[in-house]
Amino acid sequence: MHVLITADTVGGVWTYTQDLVSALAKRGIRITLVSFGALPTSEQTEWLKALPEVDYRPTSFRLEWMQDAAVDVERSRRYLQELIREVRPNLLHSNQLCYGSVKADIPRIVVAHSDVVSWWQSVHGTEPPEEEWRWYRSEVRNGLRSADLVVAPSQWMMGTLVDNDDFNTETRIIYNGRDVSLFKSSSTRSNYALSVGRVWDRGKQLDLLLNQNLDIPVYIAGPNEDPGKNTRITRFASQSELRELYSRAAIYVATSRYEPFGLAPVEAALSGCALVLNDIPVFRELWHDCAVYFEQNNATALARAVSDLSINESKRQEFADRAQSRAREKFRASRMANEYCAIYEQVLAREQVA
């Protein structure tokens, strides 16, 4: 089987791509990988050195959610059509919503990691400006309606897509996964809280942490200056440095008001952190009773939850163990790859019958 996978190097989709492509290649699946958004750094492509069989094609075409992207999206769509004619894959696995409408005589699977409309609704509580987002919404709808199968990493994400974009394509939920072997628990865990995210992204809502004087130090791994004495913002230079932060933190805090899935809590759970999560539907769906939840978007409730765990070591360990067990069961890269292999085979079998 030969699969053409599209990805982007801008956010968490690249991490997802790394684990999925690595796992698929180990199963003997031939991969042509194309990235968009920005040319990757040498650190971002380090993992590909262990996979010389993967045919990697980096590009800098702008993505559909970026400003003034219409020309680049059309050019990248033509690029993909030419590439499909060149390498002749069995199917297209697109991690961008717009490429479901690529004109090609192969099945197309679109994976909806996030979208601007649901982000806007979650952050602003309103519909996005119609005129400003008309082109984007048209691209997304055409991509979803033209695909053979639409995948989302959570029921919540799929529900918002169906509500907003009115498509009848077959759907499937496949939870994201991480390579469990990459994460470790330190024997000298420190009583501090950690959060990961872009401080400027209102969907991450990190101001809930920045504006509180918590009982323990808080580290935020992300770009911004230090906003206060009890909070430290650290710019991690590598994934290995971030994994070291996970391994030493006692508590991981997820403040997001918008999160279609959330890889960082998975990474923290695999590293042995207790999870404190904003009480939004997607976190309840994914983590059930394996996390401590604070009242939705309430900074005072967040501070109480962190304080309670910080002084109650037995409770903190209980929730850390629950989260780690669930992450190892539900959010493994190997499980994710197996489910993608299954849908690849199903879609190809339908195509052959047709």
Image (cartoon, rainbow, N blue to C red):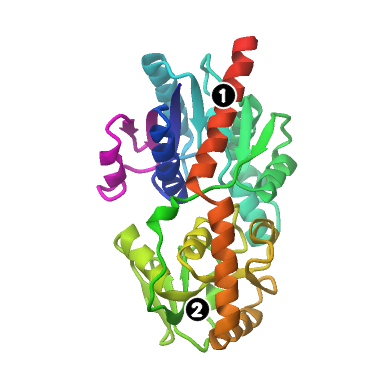
The reply to whether the magenta stretch includes residue 47 is yes
Q: Residue 345, which numbered label?
A: 1
x and y, in percent, of residue 275 in the image: 57, 70
Range of the magenta residues? 31-60
Closer-to-camera residue (307/161): 307
Query: Dot 1, crowdedness within 10 Å: few (<14), some or many (≥20)?
Result: few
Q: What's the residue at 53%, 14% (across, down)?
A: 105
Q: What's the residue at 53%, 74% (across, down)?
A: 207
Question: Which quadrant, please, contains the N terminus?
Answer: top left
Q: Which amino acid, mark 2? A: Leu
Residue 130 in view: yes
Between marks 2 and 1 in the image, the one whose residue lies nearer the viewer: 1
> CB atoms at circles 2 and 1 under 8 Å apart?
no
Quarter location, residue 241: bottom left
Q: Is residue 36 above or below residue 325?
A: above
Residue indicated by mark 2: 210
The disc, 2 or 1, on the residue closer to the chain's N-terminal end is 2
* Element under disc 2: helix
Q: Which amino acid, mark 1? A: Glu
Q: Is residue 134 above or below residue 205?
A: above
* Element under disc 1: helix
